[in-house]
Amino acid sequence: MNQTIIDIDWTERNFAAGPRDERIACVATGATLESVQEAIVEAMKFHLEGMRMHGEVIPEEFQGEWEPVFVLTTRAKLRYSDNYITRKALSRETGINTRQLSHYANGWKHPRPSTEQKIAEGIRAISRRLALI
């Protein structure tokens, strides 16, 4: 089964998703991470079906079964994690001040790759500790 990367970002009020493979021009939005994941998979299936019906060339990796691999931007990770942890807790874990985390969450600034990694690791560390309860 082929895997396809689907990027998920946060817009002003919703999550937005689209396949990284630009040959499949398809996007979806949703108020929750779960809803946007469902919506983009359905939209891609519908789009591929339409391409088949119109005799368009389907990229090889989409001719058989495929599965989505969701990749969240730092902004989407922060917005999603807001449902479960505070930015203050994440700040304590990562050493990144809350104002800077807010800048990343709102898209006003973009973190370096090393900072993106630090944020992701901080979220995971907090979730591991919570799992012990």
Image (cartoon, grey):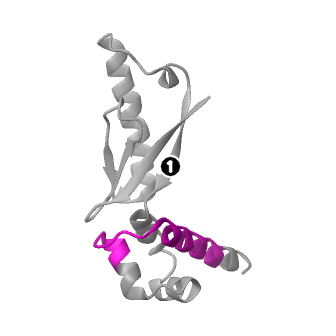
**Vertical position of residue 59 compared to residue 25: above or below:** above
In what quadrant of the picture does the N terminus appear?
A: top right
Residue 4 location, x and y as percent? 51, 37
Q: Which residue is mark 1?
A: 70
- Amino acid type for the residue under numbered disc 1: Phe
**Vertical position of residue 53 compared to residue 30: above or below:** above
- Identified at 36% across, 72% down, the residue is 105
Q: Is residue 120 left or right of residue 23?
A: right
Residue 38 location, x and y as percent? 44, 45
- Identified at 40% across, 70% down, the residue is 79
Magenta segment includes 107: yes
Residue 41 location, x and y as percent? 43, 38
- Identified at 47% across, 89% down, the residue is 88
Range shown magenta: 103-127
**Vertical position of residue 119 compared to residue 96: above or below:** above
Q: Which quadrant of the figure has residue 67?
A: top right
Q: Find the residue positioned furthest to the top.
A: 55
Q: Dot 1 surroundings within 10 Å: few (below 14), some, or many (20 or more)?
A: some
Chief SS of the magenta region:
helix
- Identified at 51% across, 80% down, the residue is 85
Q: Helix or strand or loop: what does disc 1 sit on?
A: strand
Q: Which quadrant of the figure has residue 102?
A: bottom left
Magenta segment includes 89: no
In what quadrant of the picture does the C terminus appear?
A: bottom right
Q: Is residue 122 left or right of residue 29?
A: right
Q: Is residue 13 left or right of residue 43?
A: left
Number of marks in the rendered image:
1
